[in-house]
Image: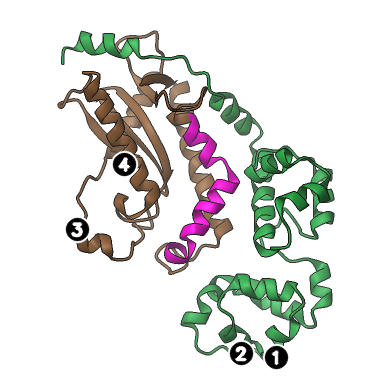
Amino acid sequence: MEFVPIFANPNETPFRGLYAVRYEDMPEGENSWSQFIDKLSDAEFRRSFIQARHANLLVKGYFGTYTVSEASNRVLDEFLDITDELADAYQNGIQELILLLNERFKPLDNQVVSEELMRSKAKPMNPKEPWVRLYAVKVSPDLYIFSGGTIKLTQYIDQDEATKHEKAKVDRLRQCLINEGMYDRDAYTELEL
Amino acid sequence: MDKSEFERKFKAKIKADTSAWKSKLAADRANRKEFRRSQRVADRILEFLEQNKDWSQKRLAEALDVTPQHISKILKGQANFTLNTIEAMEQVLGVNLLEERPIKTEAQLQTVPHADVVYKEFFVTEMNLIVAAEEVETYTYDGLQVFYQSCINYTQVKSRLRSGETSYALSA
């Protein structure tokens, strides 16, 4: 496990900002953040992702009715908005970035979904919530490690394979931190933006 | 955990960023209009491929006289286009690649009797039409009532019209 500075200065201590995790099993030159960027800026990935969920989640009226193209475009808009926002904040100084991260990242909902709910059909989440989600852990007051990001259309993280996978990535990161003796229960928080 | 110990361990695990995300995002942002256009074109071509099952990426590469690798780049929305390139692709595919509306071509409209009327209604009511088969019981517009109730979804209607099954839409 390694940490790659994304919006952070690795020469400045205490370490602050946003780092991406990189594992040995990732292809050379990739990390959790670069994989997220590649995925969400890929029109083919977005369309395929949405196609697979379109009939169940996007035409029944919870979000309004979206065509696949409209939904893909919404994801692209949100993706560009959040990456622009993070880049601009960092450009204005690490303190502004930290304020943004502190404000926007919320504790990950680790609510255990009941068996009955898991068996029931996945319901879309609140239509006002963003679809593009970023996952990270906070390991000290101003230091975030990005584990991954995806498109979230369901109410609960366990109700879609993509978000379940992101949760597993957060779990893997926590376990690696524990194994490396870098886990501080008081400082550690799993987050979703 | 002791703070200095954490800092020491963290520092030991820092690795320089060798990925290309920063330059990629910066380039896309500096040319946001072109980036969005590339994404739009990609989405239109992907939609075209979904609607026209006789078209594969291989056939597309041959028709556009580009490599399969370039097609892959185009479909990811990462290719840079001039308007001339887009126009050339539109001529090959018979599809307007920058429009927001669902895919159709003038040629298809001309070969489908009254299809202009069908499509006009189709576009206006596209959102409703997707759920029409389930939720709309009555809709009176000449023969279109039968048309709506007979079709499962928008994709099927389009592919049938495109493949020349005019009688399905108009007289089923």
The part of the chain drawn in magenta is: A34-58
The residue at which mark 3 appears reads as: A114
Name the quarter where the C terminus of chain B is drawn: bottom right
Side of B1 where A166 appears, left or right:
right
Name the quarter where the N terminus of chain B is drawn: top left
The residue at which mark 1 appears reads as: B171
In the rendered view, would you say A124 is above or below B134?
above
Q: Magenta-highlighted stretch: main secondary structure?
A: helix
Residue at 22%, 45% (x, y): give it: A110
Colour that chain B carries in the picture: green
Judging from the image, mark 2 belongs to the subunit labelled B
Residue at 54%, 53% (x, y): give it: A48
In the rendered view, would you say B158 is above or below B170?
above
Q: Residues within 10 Å of mark 2 (few under 14, many from 20)?
A: some
Q: The brown chain is which one?
A: A
> Do the residues under discs 2 and 4 have CB atoms within 8 angstroms?
no
In the rendered view, would you say B49 is above or below B110?
above
Judging from the image, mark 3 belongs to the subunit labelled A
The residue at which mark 4 appears reads as: A167
Three-letter code, disc 3: Ser
Three-letter code, disc 1: Ser
Marks 3 and 2 sit apart, C-alpha to C-alpha, by: 44 Å
Judging from the image, mark 4 belongs to the subunit labelled A
Marks 1 and 3 sit apart, C-alpha to C-alpha, by: 50 Å
> Do the residues under discs 1 and 3 have CB atoms within 8 angstroms?
no
Marks 3 and 4 sit apart, C-alpha to C-alpha, by: 17 Å
Q: Can residue B71 be seen in this view?
A: yes
Three-letter code, disc 4: Lys
- Quadrant for residue B83, please give it: top right
Marks 1 and 2 sit apart, C-alpha to C-alpha, by: 8 Å
